[in-house]
Amino acid sequence: MIIGISGCGKSLSAKVTANVFGVPLLKLDAGKIYGGLVGQSESNLRSVIQTAEAISPCCLWLDEAEKALSGSKSSGSTDGGTSSRVFVTFLSWMQEKKSPVFVVATANDVSQLPPELLRKGRFDELFFVDLPNQAEREAIWEIQIGKHGRNPKDFDLVQLGRVTDGSTGSEIESAFIEALYLAFDSGSEAGEEKEPTDLDIARVLTEFVPLSKLMAEQITGLRHWAKGRSRLATSPAVEKGLRKIAV
């Protein structure tokens, strides 16, 4: 189970897991499980389980678990208990499964997850993905700049990492994409082709409000909950290694 702040790479971690294991990745789309007929939802979930076991070894990815299982706590007055029955079926399978199906679930709001889902035996480990640190932000900038066909050496990665303190990986990517548009627009006005610079990125960031400020109270509460209850996704050894690479 991977919990943490939105935009920090939880879903990407699930995809990378399957690649590291060298097995197929199956995404469990909870929206397609629920049907309008009585018993159809439970039947759909059993079909999903049978498919995963037939393909195994594989990795089964459940994205936004708290939303997919949001009705599991209901009394049954809203959906006739369908969500609860689907949830129980999924829990029983996770507990008793023999086939090599590695389940990876992601969640943003851990308070919405039922405790029986988080206990050992269902998930082997609970990881918390926090906001990227300085070294990680520098690495993200380097990756995103190279991803969009520019040379990272043309930018001050250390300074970019500092000014984006509190930003998620997705926000860093969005900031660079916006800087690309800004440079293209200013170049079009001058009748020439213009590449983005540190100054263009700085102009974008002056008007950029990161999620850590918009949802400061919720993020602080999530961090407080995760402390002592989950394992940090970035270990001190990895963080130290990233810092050496950045230097």
Image (spheres, grey):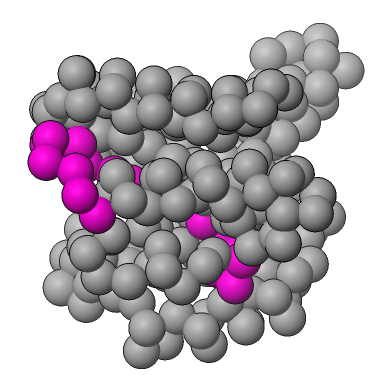
Relative side of 210 to 171, left or right: right
Place of residue 80 in the rendered image (x, y in percent of width and height, measured from the top left): 73, 45
The quadrant in which the N terminus is found is bottom left
The quadrant in which the C terminus is found is bottom left
Find out whether residue 219 is within the magenta segment: no
Place of residue 37 in the rendered image (x, y in percent of width and height, measured from the top left): 69, 22
Q: Residue at x 41, y 44 (%)?
A: 89
Place of residue 215 in the rendered image (x, y in percent of width and height, measured from the top left): 75, 70
Find out whether residue 104 is within the magenta segment: yes
Residue 224 visible in this rendered orientation of the protein: yes
Q: Residue at x 88, y 18 (%)?
A: 189
In this view of the protein, which residue sits in the foreground, 226 or 171? 226
In this view of the protein, which residue sits in the foreground, 243 or 46? 46
Q: Residue at x 21, y 26 (%)?
A: 53
**Residue pushed farthest right?**
189
Residue 98 versus residue 183 in the image, above or below: below
Residue 28 versus residue 139 in the image, above or below: above
Q: Residue at x 69, y 36 (%)?
A: 179
**Which span is picked out in magenta?**
95-112
Residue 94 versus residue 55 in the image, above or below: below
In this view of the protein, which residue sits in the foreground, 178 or 116? 116
Q: Can you tell which quarter of the image residue 192 is in?
A: top right
Place of residue 110 in the rendered image (x, y in percent of width and height, measured from the top left): 54, 68
Residue 134 visible in this rendered orientation of the protein: no
Residue 87 versus residue 122 in the image, above or below: above
